[in-house]
Each structure stands twice: as structure tokens, then as C-alpha cells.
Image (spheres, helix red, strand yellow):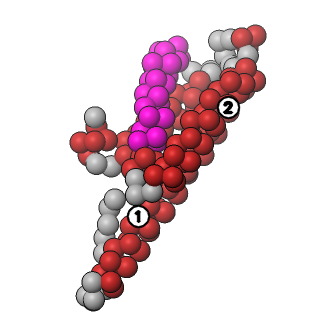
Amino acid sequence: MLSDFLRNRPFVMSISTFFGLLASLCLAIWTIPNVLKWFSFFISRAAVPYGPLSTSWANEICGADAEERAVVLGIMNASGYAFNAWLPLLTYPAISAPRFRKGFIFSTVAYVVQFGITGLVAFLQRRENRNRARARARAAGGEVEEVDVAE
């Protein structure tokens, strides 16, 4: 609801990633006060909305081309299920509970990469929108001005 209200999915996705990163970093350190551990376990769930938001955002980005949208969303879905089938078994083995050192370190790195990917896609989307706006202005025969397109 927040991303729809703000009309800025990357921003809300970055908030979600921040909380996941903070939680996994604290838990990777592990030698922290118990209150901070509990807080980290609690806020780690704030990272869950990233998946549905990224799917919605990809759907919007690819909205003009049905085939592209189908391929992109299909790859996203298949990749998510494929990795979630085996990756948790390697990174969060039950034998290392509750510390899950390898898992929390992996998650910390994954959240950093997630920040980067979100920023890269946002940058590329803005650039593509600017180029489309310039092309429309040229086609209309008007002067091409610097266009600031947020979406």
C-alpha cells in the first residue's frame, strides 16, 4: 500500500532491504545483547515485501510488451522457486541453529547485492523513460528539452 501511495516502488523496496540488511548483519555478528537479537529476528520479516514489490515493478516496467512481461515474470518466478528449493539447505542447515553463521553472512551479502540491483534497475528505468520522452518530443516536432521523468 505504501509503494502505491508514494508511487515509488524502488524507495519502498530499499526500505524493506534496509531492514533485512540490518537484521542479518546484527545476527551475523551474534555477540550482541539479547534485546538486539530479538529485535533483529523481529524486523527481519520487514524484508518479505521485497519479492511481491519487485514482481509488481517488473510488471509495470514491462507493461508495454506482453511477451517481454511474460518472459521476465516467468524467469523471476522460476528462479525464485529454483533457488529456494536448495539454497536454504546450504546456508541455514538445522545443525547450526540458532546461530546460522553461514546463513546470516550470506543474507547480509545478498541484501547488499539487492540494494545494488534495485538501484541499477531504477537508474535504467529512468534512463529509458527519458529516452522515450525525448523520442516522443522529436516525433511531435517540438524542441527537445531536458525531461525529468520519475517513472
- Where 74 sits versus 128, above or below? above
Give x and y (percent) for residue 88. 68, 23
Quadrant in the picture for residue 31:
top right
Characterize the magenta stretch by its predominant secondary structure: helix
- Where 148 sits versus 95, above or below? below
- Where 18 sits versus 97, above or below? below
**What kind of element bears circle 2?**
helix
User: Which kind of residue does numbered mark 1 sit on?
Assistant: Arg
Q: Out of 68 and 46, give the one closest to the viewer.
A: 68
**What kind of element bears circle 1?**
helix
Q: Which residues are magenta?
A: 33-56
Q: Out of 32 and 151, give the one closest to the viewer.
A: 151
- List the residue tagged with mark 1: 126
Quarter in which the N terminus is drawn: top left
Quarter in which the C terminus is drawn: bottom left
Judge whether residue 39 is colored magenta.
yes
- List the residue tagged with mark 2: 83
Give x and y (percent) for residue 39. 45, 19
Residue drawn at the location 67% of the way across and 31% of the way down = 82
Give x and y (percent) for residue 102. 72, 26
Give x and y (percent) for residue 48. 47, 28
Quadrant in the picture for residue 42:
top left
Mark 2 or mark 1, which has the lower sequence index?
Answer: 2
